[in-house]
Image (cartoon, rainbow, N blue to C red):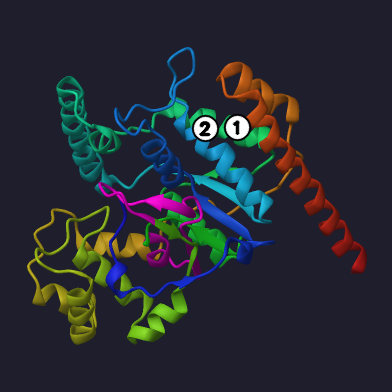
Amino acid sequence: MGVNLKGIISAREVDLEYFSGKRVAFDAYNMLYQFLTTIRDKVTGECLRDSKGRITSHLSGLFYRTVNLVEAGLKPVFVFDGEPPSFKKRTLEERRETKEIAKKKWEEALERGEEAKTYAQAAAVLTEEMVEDAKELLNAMGLPWIVAKSEGEAQCSYLCMKGIVDFSASQDYDSLLFGSPRLARNLSITGRRKLPRKEVYVEIKPEVIELEEVLKEHGITREQLVMVAMLVGTDYNKGISGVGPKTALKLVKQHKTLENVLKAVKWEDETDPYEIFEFFLNPPVEEDVKVEWKRPDEERIIEFMVEEHDFSRERVEKALEKLMKSYESGRQATLASWFKK
């Protein structure tokens, strides 16, 4: 879910072409969950499935959306979560319970013959089998992926700080807390989208957020931005009751340090606030990381998508044609750049 800092974060809208030639590290779990929740039957909320009953919504989104991104010139790297910190276990358990409740409501809505997609989305669960399928598809597409030591967004941020990639990409704002200089949002949902529970469509464009600009705008440090997030609530703590982003920002600017902020509020979370604070500032990451974009394996993609998971051969081949064309043009551009040196 991530932290909600929307009220105090300024984003700049850009076109997808802005990312042409840019290396972008995607929070893979965040992206797959988006596909898993959105690519469903509009009424029943059922996911796409193959002839063996296996869910394929995440594969559909990952393949077709990634092809569009690559066609726009973007060079993606996918980062999967590793071992979560011990103090996140309570949050994960709460999420599991929430999904169980949503699943029950989904089933009840289907029995009544009512529209059930909202409940179905809330009940979405990303399984290990789905994750492994996603990795296999990325291998076939020639796209690099890594498993983080801990949180995926922390690893994305590290890659961006070290210049291995140009942007972190996620719908959440956590990458900023982990120190990513640049965050890209909406890359996996760009386009015309229907608003939930409304017959209204909006055009969603990519957004760019610069950490330095955020800090400068509010006259705070990254450490203080982490404090703001902790007051609002993160994946590791519930936050202070009644405190939103603007109030949290005011409190932090007034009291300056975490010690003083904690004296001014009633911290009721069982997790040590200093442990959370330190985790955001110095998260465990894989440091020896190399990323390499390879030639897509056309035969394997057809085999995996069409023969194993029953996707339309015609549609897959059209997308594959775009992918191969993008790969070849990117390779030529790289060669041209190399010969100029």
Q: Residues within 10 Å of mark 2 (few under 14, many from 20)?
A: many
* CB contact under 8 Å: marks 2 and 1: yes
> What's under tag 1, amino acid-wise?
Leu
Say how many tags the image has.
Answer: 2
Give x and y (percent) for residue 277: 29, 65
Q: Nearer the viewer, mark 2 or mark 1?
A: 2
The residue singled out by tag 1 in the image is 137
Q: What is the secondary structure assignment of the residue under circle 1?
A: helix
Q: Residue at x 36, y 80 (%)?
A: 221
Between 41 and 169, the one nearer to me in the picture: 41
Identify the image quadrant of the C terminus. bottom right
x, y percent for residue 336: 88, 61
Q: Residue furthest front?
A: 199
Q: Quadrant of residue 238?
A: bottom left
**Residues under labels 2 and 1: Cα distance?**
8 Å
Give the residue furthest to the top: 52
Query: Between 260 and 98, which is closer to the camera in this rendering?
Result: 98
Establish if 281 lies above or below 191. below
- Please check the rendered image and state whether residue 195 is part of the magenta-colored stretch, yes or no: yes
The residue depicted at 57 percent of the width and 65 percent of the height is 15
Boundaries of the magenta span: 174-201
Residue 83 sits above or below residue 7 on the image: above
Residue 275 occupies quadrant: bottom left
Residue appearing at x 29%, y 60% in the figure: 3
Return the disc, 2 or 1, that comes first in the chain's sequence.
Answer: 2
Q: Give the residue at mark 2.
A: 59
Q: Residue, x 43% and y 24% (percent of image)?
A: 55
Tell me where residue 285 appears, x and y as whole percent. 48, 53
Furthest-right residue in this view: 339
Q: Residues within 10 Å of mark 1 (few under 14, many from 20)?
A: many
Q: Position of residue 170 (x, y in %)?
A: 44, 55
Tell me if residue 163 can be seen.
Answer: no
